[in-house]
Amino acid sequence: GNSVTQMEGPVTLSEEAFLTINCTYTATGYPSLFWYVQYPGEGLQLLLKATKADDKGSNKGFEATYRKETTSFHLEKGSVQVSDSAVYFCALSLGSNFGNEKLTFGTGTRLTIIP
Amino acid sequence: NAGVTQTPKFQVLKTGQSMTLQCAQDMNHEYMSWYRQDPGMGLRLIHYSVGAGITDQGEVPNGYNVSRSTTEDFPLRLLSAAPSQTSVYFCASSYSAVGGLGEQFFGPGTRLTVL
């Protein structure tokens, strides 16, 4: 079946540190890959996505590259801020004839940034 | 636009009680879904709908019913609440296009406790 494995947290970094959150996947087809972010007390919001191999998704200083050869989609940011403190979820979707559906999520990684 | 709204925000039930979690979206999205979020398990899909009158089961459908009589609304019914259903429930929607992979928009969540 399809699955997503994420780096276990929690992760605590100092402001301006470099961030990497690892994500690898197993899928029976050619998935699209996503990173969602959940700020305290809120629902999830899409951070970035990539729909095919070698695509790079980017948003708000975060980046992730779809690596088919290593089945990975690691999230990176060069200089984190306190406002980046949140839970980050890696997810995949194989889509269907109906389009977008059935996101498979990782377990989430809680990130805390210390001033 | 209000986006995806969910009510109530918090609910406490006794074992055996029934209730309905409400979800509505005003973006004319075809696709809607319900997830539950449990510690260490990420989000798991309960039920989803690709349009009015069409629903299907996700990964963990037992103990839950859904219906989709309108494009806007997608209520989740707990038939006889059990402590194992204590969780945070998220509703999500997206524009569904054949072959497309659009962004899913999440509601703020309902925190349910079953005693």
Image (tube, rainbow, N blue to C red):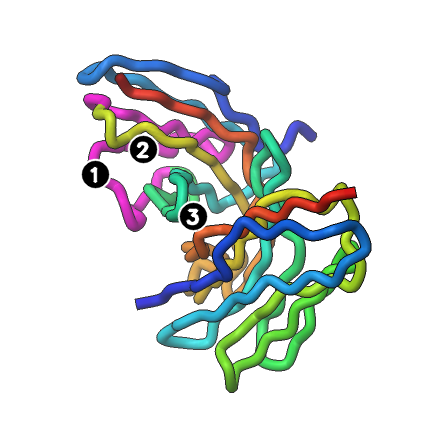
- Residue, x 79% and y 59% (percent of image)? A61
State the SS at label 3.
Answer: strand
Q: Is residue B29 above or below residue B97?
A: above
Chain letter of mark 1 equals B
How would you classify the magenta stretch by its main secondary structure?
loop
Q: The C terminus of chain B appears in which quarter of the rendering?
A: top left
Between the C-alphas of marks 2 and 3, the distance is: 22 Å
Q: Which of marks 1 and 3 is nearer the N terminus?
A: 3
Identify the mark at residue B42; answer none if there is no mark: 3
- Residue, x 36% and y 75% (percent of image)? A28
Q: Do labels 2 and 3 share a chain?
A: yes
Between the C-alphas of marks 1 and 3, the distance is: 18 Å
Q: Name the residue under label 2.
A: B66
Q: Is residue B62 left or right of residue A48?
A: left
**x%, y% of residue A78?**
78, 64
Dot 2 alpha-carbon crowd within 10 angstroms: few under 14, some 14 to 19, many 20 or more: many
* Magenta-colored stretch includes residue B57: yes
In the image, which residues are magenta? B53-81
Q: In this view, does B88 lie above or below A20?
A: above
State the SS at label 1.
Answer: loop
